[in-house]
Amino acid sequence: MTPPNPTPQARARAEAQALFLLEEGYPVLLRGPQEAGLQRLALRIARQLPPVLSRAEIEKTWRRVGMPAPELPIRRPHYTVSRGGMLGTSRLPGELDLARGGVLILADAPEFSNLEEILERASDVYVLGTAYDCPCDYAPDGECACTPEELRAYEEAVEGLFEVVEVE
Ligand SMILES: [Zn+2]
């Protein structure tokens, strides 16, 4: 049994709520089922946000990697990214640095091993995570196959770190 897709109204509501919270400075977690299209929604939301830093400040970071600075940085590192790759090293900026002034999208946020540290260091950047309702995402037969322990760990990984916006 497949749950119904989120209606356009539900998606618009989630989008407005997320934009409001992000502009207020909160890290936001979009939560919903696979068919909610969370990644697409996150990108759509990210593109509507105003830069948090001046053009000159964004360019300063990007000069260090020798790349032209985007109008609004949007970074989507995979959760397997190394700690240095995410937080930067003395020599190179990490994904978090490159996202500054813009948006850091954390797809499958509960899977990031150092989520708390990332959020502690996230300044001058919007943080927008996504998470499915549960780690198995009702695969393969539409029934949740997660153990209570798995569900608890998945919840605890993001607990207290984000403002949660349900996409249903
Ligand atoms: Zn499950």
Image: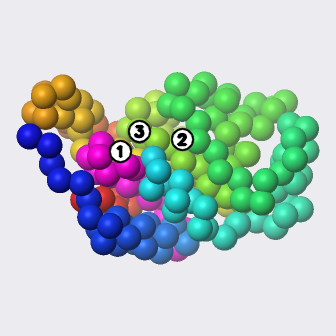
**Which residues lie in the magenta part?**
24-38
Badge 1 crowding class, 10 Å Cα cut-off, few under 14, some 14 to 19, many 20 or more, is: many
Residue at the disc numbered 3 = 108
Residue at the disc numbered 2 = 117
- Give the position of the N terminus as an image quadrant: top left
For disc 1, does the CB lie below 8 Å from ligand 1? no
Indicate whether 145 appears above or below 74: above
Circle 1: element type: strand
Dot 2 or dot 1: first in sequence order is 2
On the question of residue 3 being in view, the answer is yes
User: Any magenta on residue 36?
Assistant: yes
Q: Nearer the viewer, residue 149 or 10?
A: 10
Give the amino acid type for the residue marked by disc 2 in the picture: Glu
Circle 2: element type: helix
For disc 3, does the CB lie below 8 Å from ligand 1? no
Give the amino acid type for the residue marked by disc 1 in the picture: Ala
- Quadrant housing residue 81: top right
